[in-house]
Image (tube, grey):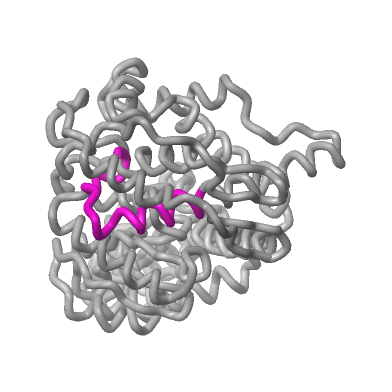
Amino acid sequence: MKRSLSGSPAFGVLIACALLAAPHQASAQPAGQTPGQAAAGEAPAAPAAPAAPTGLSESVAAVVNDAIISTYDLAQRMRLLIATSGVQPTQENLPQFQREALVSLVDEQLQFQELRRVEREQKIEILADNAEVDEEIADMAQQNNMSREQFLGFLASRGIGVDTLRQQIRASMSWQRWIRGRYGSRLRIGDDQIAATQARFAAEAAKPQYQIGEVLIDASRVGGMQQAMAGAQQLVTQMQQGAPFPAVARQFSALPTAATGGDAGWVSAGEMPPEVEAVLEQMRPGQLSQPIAVRDGVYILYLRDKRAGGSATLVNLKQAAVALPQGASADDEAAARSKLAALKPQIRDCATLEATAAQAQGVVAGDLGEAELDDLAPQFREAAEKLDIGQVSDPIRTAAGMHLIAVCGKRAAGAGAIDKEQVEQRLFSQQLGMIARRYMRDLRNSATIETR
């Protein structure tokens, strides 16, 4: 349940004025890089964020099940968002920063309350301890080519207390640990799901694939589609002016890929909402999309690369062969065929093919490498089409001799090979992400949240 508190001072206006009026300070970091920025090749960072506002009186910004979030907490989180997203604060986007900061603080308070309840009832420890939080801060500093002291100094120069960062890290680490611990062991990705996904990838291999970065502004989290669309438009404007996409994704995206700076890897038709795919088809590599309205919110896409699909199939083959001239007698052919037929059941897999073949006199084994199916000799192509990965053919007669071929790999041309383990991990992450979002929606709906 949510309701507003009346009679509160206009603290948002005070924070906005202080943020916009404060002078810029020199950066304590490598030029052109902000905390959270991805590797080289991304857009340069926006100008340094303003210094911290001073002289604000502290009051209540929100109450979450009787727990208070102060205006000081809110101002601190706004500064942290500005510093780590690379977005320059303006009169237009400060309301979005304030809204995102308040929503994040409310969600974290709900998470802490839920985790402490679970700890009490189940007599377990879930919350990340100080050592774990310190290790994460050290990792963040290293990712930005700074020492821990330099990183904290950079935040301090923008008026951000270390406790603000520590709380955000502790909440994120603890919540992810709880979600994975509670639901991860229960999630079962069936072989049928994996097979269906692999079949869909194979069927779509002839279609274009896109390497994308993604941001989703969750409409239910920010107060509706209108707010989501307005916020997304402001983020697009800031990224066009230099705010790095990965840093924005980490702070604002509601998708699981936020943890990796919005990197969704290569996607094909059918993996994204239809509204998103329609935009992707028109984009060029290096281009940032305008906001795209979908059922749950608003998408922003960054197209890193694009490749044409291919209908060709690539196969990786090994062989065991007996040299046999084209004019060999029927008896010689029968002997070679019999020798390879006896060898076939002894070949357990591609890794042991050469060693197994070496034990048979007169048999030579080798790796034929990867080739397009259509480029193979007709006898090899016919066998490779029918065989699954790991299977071995019956003896095949060619002009050069008698052969067994083993299919060690098979994939669609133009698409990176995606094995069972990769598919399983992708499906697992998607399902766990949906569970986490539903969990948070349930907590919000059952809570008493009062905001000024």
View extreme (front): residue? 7
Q: Depth check: 175 or 241 in front?
A: 241
Q: Depth check: 12 or 426 in front?
A: 12
Image coords of residue 95 (percent x, y): 35, 57
Q: Is residue 202 left or right of residue 184?
A: left
Image coords of residue 17 (percent x, y): 28, 45
Q: Which residues are magenta?
A: 83-104
Residue displayed at 75% across by 32% down: 125
Res 58 visible: yes
Q: Is residue 43 above or below residue 191?
A: above
Q: Is residue 100 above or below residue 135?
A: below
Q: Please state, as top left, top right, bottom left or bottom right, where the N terminus lies in the image.
A: bottom right
Residue displayed at 43% across by 54% down: 100
Q: Is residue 132 above or below residue 450?
A: above
Residue displayed at 33% across by 62% down: 214
Image coords of residue 318 (percent x, y): 36, 56
Residue displayed at 15% across by 49% down: 43
Q: Quadrant of residue 152?
A: top left
Q: Depth check: 146 or 404 in front?
A: 146
Res 339 visible: no
Prevalent SS, magenta region: helix
Q: Is residue 246 left or right of residue 48?
A: right
